[in-house]
Amino acid sequence: MFPVRNLIPIATAGLLAQAADRPQFGTAWSRNMTSGERGLPDSFDPASGRGVRWSVPLGGSGSESHSTPVVAGGHVYVGTNNEAPRDPRRTGDRGVFLCLSEKTGALVWQLVVPKREEDIYHDWPKTGMSSPATVDGDRVYLVDNRGVVLCLDAKGLANGNQGGTNEAAYYTPKSTNGIPVGPELPLGPLDADILWSFDLTREAGIWSHDAAHSSILVDGDLLYLNTGNGVDNTHRRIRRPDAPSLVVLDRHTVRWLAQDGLGIGPRIFHCTWSSPSMARIDGRKRILFAGGDGVLYGFDPFRPRRGQDGVARLEEVWRFDFDPEAPKSEVSTYLNNRRTSPSNIYGMAAVDGDRIFVAGGGDWFWGKNEAWVKCLRAGGRGDRTKEVTVWSHPLGRHTMSTPAVADGLVFAADSMRTFHCLDAATGEAVWTHELDGEVWASALVADGKVYIGSRRGGFYTFTLSRTKRLLGEVHLDAPISATAVAANRVLYVGTGRTLYALTR
């Protein structure tokens, strides 16, 4: 057990989902960064404890925790690294995924996964477990730091090993030739229970890069997820050009049912960062997915056929090229070109009514200094690049934001420390605010407020209004990569070192 400030740990809460839970990254289906929560704080002060219900350490000095928390069934789930080990037997750099009590922050169970051994570019040092989880009932779906899709029991091993997986072997570090390094350690009730796994590297043939960041979309019995296929350590070569960018799994049988089948691989400039979302377009459900080639694709939902043999191809309905003037071939030759390069989309497509909002542009690390927020009205079939743009608004240099859309306003941040409030109908600037640092997170709109954190540790609260009003500003203990989350009248803010549960 690790220290929890302010409250005494109590027993684990039940598993029945509450109406105000936040069980995935963004709102269900649409991925819009909004919440209907009420009673959230305008400001807080960790130094005095004002507004802090509890806080939990995630990592030590220099930690790089990047995971956005999710809240479901009385638990808070968040990824981190192992800079502050919670199990003294498992030390060193590893990916860690925590299940915490929603009421107290006490540890319920944890998943501790060794790093990839072959190349640091597969699983960058100290990045830990970066993917946000998706919770459905008593099942927790996650892509871990090794690029393995996991289905976890929300109760952990406290109720026994339900899936028959040899967790002890999975948690044991191995050498590059697969030989265990050290003994398999005994497991206990504070360990995760892996019900099943699907290795994207071994089974889907991807080449992961830097860190897995995939938020799984659940639609009935199906799981949709981006694969994280990307460049190798030279940043100029796609080792697995034929590997899929989007896959569909059966969450019961763990069968790989379908993939995009579009040959996106050779056009990936850096990696596949964006997770899928869902919308209703032309009266039908559509899966929306931004590939590593800077194109937003719309697919028909997959319908498994009885007796299906092999992996099917998703039916593409339409596509939108986010940056049609950008280079489309030999993309690696534009590496580190800050004037001309392909575009990339880190965030997700957010849906509000009949419109889709997407932010993207030159790759943050290697691409051109140009970025935009765009509003689309996506309908019809085929290449809709020229027909569906409602408006386009320039941002500064680069962006990682998933837009937050509420009350006729759109919120997104860029790498020039500027937080933008735009008119959702026209794309015109309503107001901007200079933050203390660059932004990797997305804004959250909830309770008539807008929350955003920076990589310098600044956390800001604005009024949801066309008139800019800064309600609160606090400087926290480490960079903020995670998007703030609201659930059950509590605001969760994660830094590289600490997860805060905040109330009025």
Image (spheres, rainbow, N blue to C red):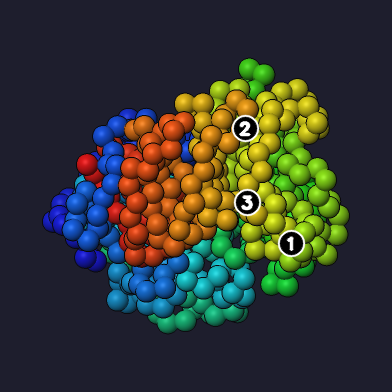
Query: In which image quadrant can residue 354 be found?
Result: top right
Can you identify the residue that label 1 sits on?
Answer: 338
Of the pair 56 and 201, the residue shown nearer to us? 56
Q: Is residue 451 or residue 490 the one in the foreground?
A: 451
Question: Residue 114: horizontal and vertical position, in percent?
Answer: 47, 71
The part of the image, by quadrant, that contains residue 298 is top right
Foreground: 239 or 160? 239
Residue 183 placed where, x, y %? 40, 79
Residue wearing tag 3: 396
Q: Earlier in the sequence, mark 2 or mark 3?
A: 3
Q: Which mark is residue 427?
A: 2
Task: State whether residue 258 is above or below residue 11.
Answer: above
Q: Residue at x 67, y 19 (%)?
A: 282
Q: Is residue 116 left or right of residue 60?
A: right
**What kind of element bears circle 2?**
loop
Secondary structure under tag 1 reads: loop
Residue 91's place in the image compared with 438, above or below, is: below
Q: Quadrant of the N terminus?
A: bottom left
Q: Earlier in the sequence, mark 1 or mark 2?
A: 1
Q: Is residue 26 visible?
A: yes
Q: Is residue 125 left or right of residue 110?
A: right
Residue 397 position, x and y percent, is 65, 54
- Please state which amino acid type lies under the numbered disc 1: Arg
Q: Residues within 10 Å of mark 2 (few under 14, many from 20)?
A: some
